[in-house]
Amino acid sequence: MSITNATHDRPRTCPVGESVVGFADRDPFGFYERLREAGSPTWDPEARAWLVHDFDQCLIAERDESRFANAYVFADEIVKEIKGGGANITLSRDGDHVKLRRFHFKLLSAANIESYRQIHIAPVLAASLARLEGRTTADLAADYAAIIPARVICSLLGMPTDDDAMVAEILACNDAIVAFIASGYRDTDLRDKALAASRRLNEMLLPYIRARRDEPADDFISRVWRDAPDFGIHMDEEAALGICRELFFAGSDTTVHGIANALYLVLADPKLMDKVRANPEDALPAVVEESLRLMNVVQFRHRFCMEDTEVGDTTVKKGEMIILLHAAANRDPERFPCPADVDLDRPDLTGHLAFARGTRSCVGSSLARTEMHEAVREIIDRFPHLHLDASAEPPSFRGLYMRSMGPLNVILGPSA
């Protein structure tokens, strides 16, 4: 990856000693508010990027890829390999990107999601809850949220869901790739670890990709081979691997954090828990959306300026990086009144940037929402006395680029 290191004057810079990359395992929201007081965008010398934290400025950048290209526009061959190569939707551009988005939207349509909920999500949740039976305490971040999404993706791909060692390795590989992304694609040590993780993921997936090419079944991999050509996507082994690798990555790690954050909201506020129990059909979807807005699993996204352009009151030079601070933008008081509060009656609950906007918005958002909704609903139904364990380590933010609250130490109480 490359970026221009311009030397022009910076009208605003981060407070001395603070940087967006310095908040690993720390609450960043006080920092975001200090940035907001100074104005957007703000130059971050350590990240070597402009921090964009105004909601409308983020939205403009998300929707205009001609000026604000995604981070992979300058990707070298190593970065492409780390992301899975082939027909990977995050690496694609222009017409190829349009074709891949159309295919993914068919694969993840509302009708299909309902089918996946019954066939793939429900059995994984049942098995995950069964592991908690007979216990009085648990860490729901590690013992529940972390074990669900990778298994759902494995089920969708026609892979085993009960191999604990494989699931743990998938998550570890994804974490290595996330750490490299969080560095702005610059840290060479993290790059090498991410490359090794990527190659290991390929080793896990390729036998299934080859088997489904030769003997199709009823799973995602078989549908990739069968249906992607109908969307004008040239299919070979490398293309199939690229598509499945992104499903493997985006469909597991992010949703782990999403489930944990939604659980945290209801566990941290007994009154909110009571509202969800009393009216789950209305309250729970709103809780999911507010958890996405307030906690924002993916804290920020990288973009490169393709020409000299105005961002707010600042000229950003061609080749410079901007970092879209979605977690800050989703608490912009100009967009969300009382932004730090949980409000189940917000008029536009889905108007946040948690899944991005424009042509790079998350094509798997419906699947993620469904998993979050079902995971919270099932566990509060199963354990009617569920509450945080006041005697155990309290939750705090963990992670940097992707983050969630944990541990979620709870008293399970008797099952229903």
Image (cartoon, rainbow, N blue to C red):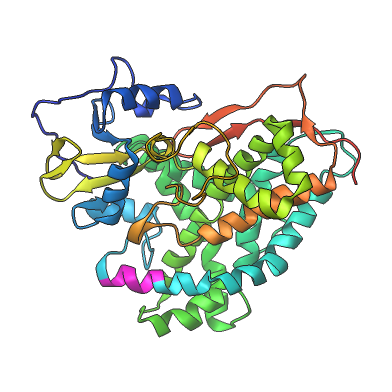
What's the magenta region? 95-101
357 with respect to 76 (left or right) = right
In percent of width and height, residue 285 lies at 63, 52
In this orientation, does residue 75 appear? no
Q: Position of residue 16 (x, y in %)?
A: 28, 14
Viewer-proximal residue among 16 and 133:
16
Between 260 and 186, the residue placed more toward the observer is 260
Of 264 and 247, nearer the camera is: 264
Magenta-colored stretch includes residue 99: yes
Q: Position of residue 274 (x, y in %)?
A: 76, 39
Write the residue at 46% across / 59% down.
246
Decide whether residue 363 is among the magenta residues.
Answer: no
Q: Is residue 413 visible?
A: yes
Residue at x-position 31% and y-position 23%: 37
Q: Residue at x 44, y 45 (%)?
A: 177
Q: Main secondary structure of the magenta part?
A: helix
Q: Is residue 222 left or right of residue 280?
A: left
Vertical side of 26 occupied by 51: above or below: below
Q: Position of residue 10 (x, y in %)?
A: 14, 26
What residue is rendered at 59% in x and 33% in y?
405
Up/down of 364 relative to 215, above or below: above
Residue 15 against residue 138 in the figure, above or below: above
